[in-house]
Image (spheres, coloured by chain):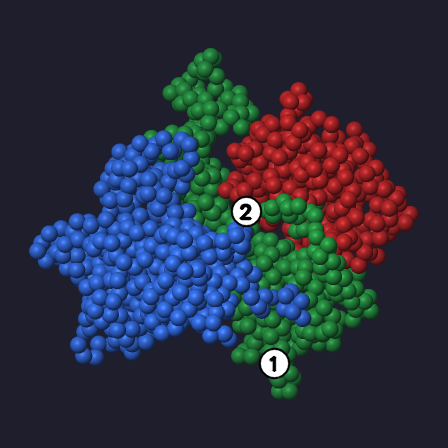
Chain colours: A red, B blue, C green
Amino acid sequence: MTGAFQQLPEELKLATSAHVKYIQSLDTRQDEYDYWLTEHLRLNGVYWGLTALHLLGVPEGLPRSETIDFVLSCQHEDGGFGAAPGHDAHMLSTVSAVQILAMVDAFDELETRGKGKAQVGKYIANLQNRQTGTFAGDEWGEEDTRFLYGAFNALSLLGLMDLIDVDKAVDYVAACANFDGGYGVSPGAESHSGQIFTCVASLTIAKRQDLIDKERLGKWLSERQLANGGLNGRPEKKEDVCYSWWVLSSLEMIGKTHWIDRDKLINFILQCQDTEKGGISDRPGDMVDVWHTLFGITGLSLLGYPGLELVDEVYCLPKSTITRIFGP
Amino acid sequence: MESLADTLWDVVICGTGLQQSLLALALSRSDKKVLHIDPNDFYGGAEAAFSLQEVESWVEKVEAGKEGLFEAASVEKLEGDTGLSFPRAYSLALAPQLIHARSTLLSQLVSSRAYRQVEFLAVGSFSIFKPSPDSSQKPTLVRIPSTREDVFSTTAISAKAKRGLMKFLKFVLDYDSTPQTATWQPHADAPLTEFLLKEFKMDQELQTYIITLTLSLDGKINTRDGLAVIRRHLSSMGMYGPGFAALYPKWGGLSEIAQVSCRAGAVGGAVYMLGTGVKTMNNKEDPIVIELTSGDTIKTRKVVRANESATDHSGINRLVAVVGSSLKSLFESTVEGAPTPAVAIVAFPAGSLSTAAGEASKSPVYLSVHSSDTGECPVNQSVLYFTTGSEHASKDLLQQALDSFLAAVAGDTVPQCLYKLQYKQLQSSAQSQASGSIFDFAPPATALAFDDSTLQSVHDAWKMVLGDEAVEEEYLTFADREGAMDDDEVYD
Amino acid sequence: MADQGGSQHGIARTSRTRTPAQKQADLERIQQYRALEAHLRTAVSSSNYSRETFDLTTKLLRLNPEYYTAWNVRRRTLTFGLFSRRSDGCSCSRGCSSSSRSGTTTMSFGASSCSCSTRTPPGRGCRRTGRSGTTADAPVAQEEEKDEEEEEEEAAQKKDLETVKSELAFTFPLLLESPKCYWIWSYRLWILDQSILLLPVADAKKIWQEELGLTSKMLSKDRRNFHAWGYRRHVVGQLESDELGGESLVESEFGYTDRMIRADLSNFSAWHSRSTLIPRLLDERGAGEKEREDFLKTELNLIREALDVGPEDQSLWYYHQFLVDNIVSPVGRPTIVPTLTVDERVVYLTNEITNIKDLLEDYEDVKLIYEALLEYTLGLCQLEERKPEEDERQDLIDWVKKLKELDPMRMGRWVDLKRDYGLTELLPGGRG
């Protein structure tokens, strides 16, 4: 495969340095209105950007101590994290916080300067609905398999899975399965690639892949690839770079990545780059953002694009981080 | 204000038909001095919409030979108290045209912000009239399936025919790309029906469905033009919402757009004079000197007018009928989430009607049925617009179509025709053209659907008027004039 | 991790250079926005949940509906005072003293309060009764209350109804503008839940019913919006629940999927919804064996007619697969025809295979047809517990070949399939 890449035209190679610069520039855009409109995503944004930098081989691309300071500044008394100081605690930002700290190997700082791992675990565990097993995003009660996955992801990284009723949560995930092999946001909801990722990854963390109808799911996932190489999230929808992650990681978890045309997907992702100013967009020619930039890069990493660090298909973190935490 | 005579006008636009009015709209943000006159005392020219009173005076003028494009006009009213409302409760369009969702006219109305003053209604189903097989049965109207979902839901055609139709519909959507062009180009100038038979093995009935979608007045449209028109129809489907491909402006169709455009012209500073025409014009001089019928003599750099001298006497025959029924069954929305349509199209294919002499019709008759939602008649009534290419005894044919239609939609009783207006509209082969400082628009087309090529001449006229000052990017692209919503204002 | 908005979708890439005037305009907007934000934070830090704070959230959320903390503050201002919450915590004045604490937890917001149960309305006894009478579960014994208190109660409910309505009206345009914003949907649901807590059943029910109309409206604008579909499922569930004294809506929802499908055959969301409604539909109809078979036949007919006009459409094949699942593997799932014998199932499946083969006459290059043929033929063998017959084997080999040709992107899958079922021409398979 490497040989083939050398023959790619310049615009179809990964513009690594442009992407690094793009990500590093994100926090300097304080004179742009959008910077302020997206503050409710700041912590998630740091996770997206930092993961991308790690995969691009520039793990020190954001200053470590400032990153940790910022993460800890988002923590509330109850252990949960908000998206930025002054924002309420939420599962999604809490998971991002844990992932960032895992990546920069700073769980000890959470103990010494933050509210401690146990408190974070408690915050997350408290969001489990003990009747149904699923999780809410915050005290206001929106439930979604995204939050369940987030809880599994963060708690397993922290080694605190025993705080929750894993079996019940697994039952809940199993109940989200549809006849087409996919999973939805709650029982009865339509299969959706994003939700499939959260459910398959949750079952993988819980070591319950036996519950997955891999043949049928693989079939459904492989049908997401469209003629231009891109992947869509549901039948009869348009392609989007972010599904390079949701679909591909799910295929990887069930061992069926070879069921799609990897070269065509690589090509599609590369076409979505802004090679000049950096960043990756949902489709060729659209506006870039850090979210699509990450999922374009994680997609390429899963596809074995040369020069990229390996990404873990379950945690969406560098493999090296996962190996450091769980052992090889 | 300066007097008419003291002003050196940049342009005098004569006539307020659609093209002249769109030109006025296009010039409304320029700083040109525009004098917009019309010898008629109404807006819209050949595209006007009339109250019943206005119809009567218009008919008189036609009969006196003062309306160049029209002849053989007559009005018939049912005697006695028929339920006909007061004259101003009606707004009958002389040349109602539907506008496909993909038409450039719509995008220009949007970019020029003029659309804010127009209320658009959905054009619903296209149906075909089927004569009764024997005298014991009513004639029927059969909907033409024109989307995959229509084809799926229709019970009128067989499974095999459905697949054939789907293949054709798919083909048309993509007909001008490479593998497809090879299929139709050899047939480009042959009648579309021939192509449908040869390449898609379509039977007569399916052919009729397809030909009807072209709204071709003589039914003889060639393959090249036919495919283009059908593609326009299919690709327009669903663009502004489920279940419809075309729109119709409330209160009289294109006449409404002409008026809105003139209003924009007036807001932009143009001076309007109705009932005023050109008496004499001396274009040897620069500026051009014009003596108006009002007696004023004015000077202008440019003149834009319409060529209304019909060059031959071919034309189309129209019958406008007001009927005392809401004809509800024609205006049901059949698709979830679709708006209630206000216009329905019915085609009477060639051969489906017969004249009093017992001859089968040689060309199709089209009917555009307008509900009272169009504002063209009071509630519980409808307006029927019949059109046919001119042929011998076509007046008779239109009457046949009217009777047959009413029989087809009859419930317990046959809806009553309360009012009838008939006339012939002449066609002309004249083209729009500029010569020196004068621009002549071709007479309006008689087609049933708005043809975007009309817009090209408006654009040409605009360029002639502005000359070097014309900036392409700014053509009909304007910001909202005032009251444009500022976020802070709204939110405070 | 997951998409919470803020990502760019479908917006054309434009030059990022701004003119000095644009920069200045941006700075001014930023200043206004941040001032608003600072104002709100000050209010929150002093626990000022007044009307003024509520108004601040209105302004902020109109500028940025993704600002989840502002939605939370708004909820707090409502529960702190704008809703007619009584001082004793639970505002239910009658018949629920024992369960009143459960009423308050859903409204509390202390740092320690978790509440996964916030979406679950509190115990039944806690709901207030309507003006016209009592709900079935409200203890009638305590009906003799003072008139004055009743009047107060009515006035409070009227005010709450207005608040609920105005909150719904507030979020509606935001939802139209940002139909994929999770926070708006979830806030709206929270408001709807409040209506159950605070209003007489009849009023609450009416509000929830109107909400069904809203989802129809949202879905006619974007037929696949999965927020709207999920929301619709939730709204229907609530309308059907005891809380709202509801009756089953399964028939009307089934009819809704029908209409949505007829508007757009490619709407897999509608087909999916249809598939989930069927087991309940048949149960509630009390369908016997014959009715169930008739139902299956009707559905098979429907999808066959759809496939006639859209064989390249995945949505249709997924639904077909769902029906075939019901024929082939009855065990363990709610099924349409649980009592069919194997022989009867074989007849159904053989018939489907024949019909699909017939599609090839008009659509020989549609790969989904070959996929279906492969899968169903293997399903047939599985049903009859046998290996493919020689002619079937040849068909299977031909179909895989065709798939490789028509769909090389999924080559890996076809290779696996060939390997897993031993579909190689060189090795004679022999009869099973």
The answer for which chain carries disc 1 is: C
Residue drawn 74% across and 27% down? Answer: A307
**Left or right, B271 with reference to A22:** left
Residue for badge 1: C154
Q: Secondary structure at mark 2?
A: loop
- Res. B321 in view: no
**Left or right, B455 with reference to A79:** left
Residues beneath discs 2 and 1 located on the same chain: no
- Res. B486 in view: yes
Q: Quadrant of residue C13?
A: top right
**Left or right, B383 with reference to A305:** left
User: Quadrant of the image for the C terminus of chain A?
Assistant: top right
Q: Secondary structure at mark 1?
A: helix
Reply above or below: A278 against B77: above
Residue drawn 65% across and 69% down? Answer: B489
* Disc number placed over residue A20 in the picture, else none: none
* Disc number placed over residue A190 in the picture, else none: 2
